[in-house]
Every structure is written in C-alpha cells, then in structure tokens.
Image: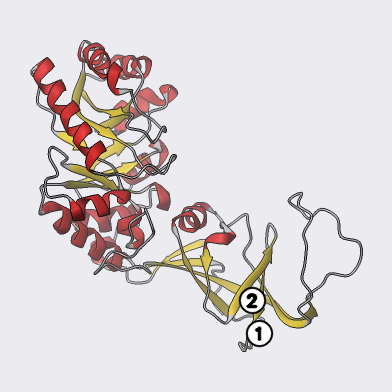
Amino acid sequence: MNSFMPRIEISLSQIQDNARALTELYGRKGISLMGVSKAVLGEPSIAEAMIQGGVRFIADSRIENIQKMENAGISAKFVLLRTPLSQAESVVQSVTISLNTEIRTLKELSYYAKAQNKDHQVIIMVELGDLREGILPCDLLQFIRETLSLSHIKVVGIGCNLACYGGVKPGDKNMRELSELASLIEKEFQISLEIISGGNSANYEWFNSAQDVRKINNLRLGESILLGCETLNRKAIPGLHTRAFQLFAEVIESKKKPSLPFGEVCQDAFGNVPSFQDRGTRQRVIIALGRQDVLVSSLKTNNKLEIIGSSSDHIILESKDQNLQVGDEVKFNLDYAGLLAAMTSPFVKKQFVDCSDVFAVA
C-alpha cells in the first residue's frame, strides 16, 4: 500500500511536451508564451518543465510562489499577474514584469525601484469587457501618460484578460481593439511596446481562425499547458496530453448500505438539507479525500463509479460491478478547478512519476 495518500501524480515530461507543442504552434504567428504556474502553487519542477518546453516567461499571481521558484534556482523572467500595493517592495525585488491597473500601486513600485536602483517593467491591463481587471479604453492614454512620468518604471506592453470572470470570448473584435490601442499608445508617446498580451488559454479558438493576429504577440497559458485543453469549451487541443495530473485516494470503507438515510433529516455539515432517492441497497465506498482537499465536482471517475456525496474529509461513491476493498486506490482525472484545489491542499502529496536530471529542481 502506498503510504502517500491521497496523492497527485504529475508527469513532467507530458507538461514539457505540451509546452513545446504550444510554443511551436503559437510561434508560427509570432506569439510568445507566458507559462502560468498559479494552479500548481508555483511548483519549481513544473515551471522548469515549461521552460524546457520553450516558454519564455513564468507568470504567477502570488509573489510567494515566485519567490519559491526563485529560491529553488528557476532561471526565468518572472511575471506577476496581480500587484498588491502592500507587496510592492517584494515585487520589485523578485519580479521582472508586473501587470498593473492602479497609479497608486505604480507609484509604490517606482519608489522601491528607485530605492533598489533598478528599473521595473510593467504591462498595463486594459478592460475589454470581461470586467475583472483593466483600465477602460477611454482612460488609457491619460493612465499611460501618468505612468510614463514615474521614474524607474518602464512600460513594456499592454494586455487584456478575457473569459475568466465574465466569460467574455476572445475574438477578432477585442483582439483588434487591443492592437489598435497599442498602435495609438506607440504613436501618442513615441514608444515601442514589446508585449501585446492578448489573453490566455481561452484564445485558442481565436488563434486558429485568425488570418491576421495583428499586433498580438503574447499569451498567458496555464490550463492549456497543464491539462492540454482550451478553456471556452474545455475541448482537448489536438496532440496535447490531457492527463499529466492524476489524483489517487485510498478506499477506507467498502460496505453494502441502503441508499436512504434513516432517522430525521436536518442540515448537513455545510448547511444544506439533502434529499435522497431510494435506489435500494448499494455497494458504498468511502475514500480518504474530501472537500478540504479538492473541489469534488471537478473529479472525473470511470463509468463504474459514481460520486454520490462528500463531507470535509470523505467522498462517498457507489460502485457498479467494481469490487473495491479497503486499501485499494481510486484514480481520478481533474479539471482546472480540481487541479487548483488539490495542488493547494497540504494533505495531498505531490509525486513526480517521470522525474529526470532535467527536472532536478524540486
């Protein structure tokens, strides 16, 4: 019996393959990639696999993850996907580029960049409809003007975020608008923008159909590299691995039980009043995994197992023609939300299944 339960098995070679395939694919139209490491908690070996696959930048939303990768010896241009005002000093110290939308934060970055005698590079995010982060296009020129007046701050690009909060689809219209805004900025201020970052793993469909990507020359990819799919419809991208991460949990109980609870039903542990259908006596299996470890709805099982409920520490399954016993393992595939939760949980062990000298960072 494996003593590391539950655990997530990670194939670094498959992540590297995906990074390489996507780097080559997007590179055909002049688009570079940022490998986004936030879903894997800034795991250094996974960042290294992305780099070995040709990714130019490693991007994360938490400075702590970037510092972990930096301390582990990862050599890359680090990009911070959000910039808390209170962490400005650490951002300047550890990050090459940060994404920004607030002048107050940029002033703090300028202050600490001057104190550290270095220039800090920034990408200014533009709001193009998804309503997460970004400056409205009508306010962009004034914002750029103020940013350019700050010492030790270098504007290296603009970007947008789509399909994360509002689910707004990247397409020709918003990519054209971002390109036109980049041209407007370059003309107005006589500067050259190195990075026009058009979005994330949701941009795959746009990329495939676009005859002209205009000025878009960068994307920030997490899910596509890690799980091999695009994020508008979660369809697999041809040629990519979709099972680089697999979750295993131990069976801790296996018994035949009635499908209806007996006794008065009130609220469950999470404040819901559950309802049940009488399906007769069934083979019930409990595994050592719960809501504290993973988003249960994100788990994908084989067709002989059905998840029927969960609590903080347990998931209850019904087994169809699969005689699972105590000590057996159950394997799950994960979507992005499940990967994010499982990699964050301290109770899920992370195990590399094809580690080699290339990935000796961890």
Q: Position of residue 325 (x, y in %)?
A: 66, 84
How many marks overall?
A: 2
Q: Is residue 118 visible?
A: no
- From the top left corner, tell me how far across and down residue 98 is, in percent: 29, 31
Which quarter of the rendered picture does the C terminus lie within?
bottom left
Q: Residue at x 19, y 26 (%)?
A: 181
Residue visible at 33% across and 29% down in the picture:
127
Residue 88 in picture, x, y percent from top left = 37, 23
Kind of residue indicated by mark 2? Val
> Which image quarter: residue 137?
top left
Q: Please name whichever residue, 298 or 328, is drawn nearer the observer in this view of the structure.
A: 298
Horizontally, residue 279 falls left or right of residue 110, namely: right
Q: Which mark is residue 325?
A: 1
Quarter the N terminus occupies: bottom right
Residue type highlighted by circle 1: Gln
The secondary structure type at the circle numbered 1 is loop
- The quarter holding residue 140 reads top left
User: Looking at the rendered structure, which numbered label has been put on residue 251?
Assistant: 2
Q: Position of residue 341 (x, y in %)?
A: 52, 53
* Proximity of marks 1 and 2: CB atoms separated by less than 8 Å: yes
